[in-house]
Image (cartoon, rainbow, N blue to C red):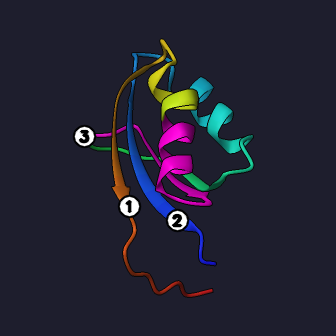
Amino acid sequence: MAKTKAVVLVNTEVGADDDVFNMLANMPEVKAVYMVYGLYDIVAVIEGDDKDSVYNIVYRALRSSPKVRSTLTMIVVKDHEKR
């Protein structure tokens, strides 16, 4: 069965971007994490068994953290990855 993948945009509290980046980089469900310039501070690609597991990862790791100001989660419906 195919895994559920999501792209998560994260706004951190001022000065907390490195901490949140490192937390995400150490999670096995996070397949890629990027610190970016723009409206968001971090972009993460998360993979779970289904939508509920992706939701639990985002809620448990991100939304409950006092270092995270907000998130925007987009479930991937189709992809084409180049390697």
Q: Find the magenta span and give its range.
A: 39-58
Residue at image mark 1: 75
Which amino acid, by three-letter code, is at mark 2? Thr
Whichever of labels 1 and 3 marks the residue nearer the N terminus, that label is 3
Residue shown at 71%/42% (left/top)?
27
Residue shown at 59%/77% (left/top)?
2
Q: Is mark 1 on a helix, strand or loop?
A: strand
Residue 51 drawn at (x, y percent): 47, 55
Question: Within 10 Å of the Cα at label 2, are there few (<14), some (14-19), or many (20+) other Cα atoms?
Answer: some
Up/down of 73 relative to 15, above or below: below
Q: State how far apart marks 2 and 1 are (Cα).
A: 7 Å
Residue 36 drawn at (x, y percent): 42, 46
Q: Do the residues labelled 2 and 1 touch (CB within 8 Å)?
A: yes
Residue 47 drawn at (x, y percent): 59, 59
Q: Do the residues labelled 1 and 3 touch (CB within 8 Å)?
A: no
Q: State how far apart marks 3 and 2 are (Cα).
A: 25 Å
Q: Do the residues labelled 3 and 2 touch (CB within 8 Å)?
A: no
Q: Is residue 17 located in the magenta-colored stretch of the structure?
A: no
- Numbered circle sitting on residue 67: none
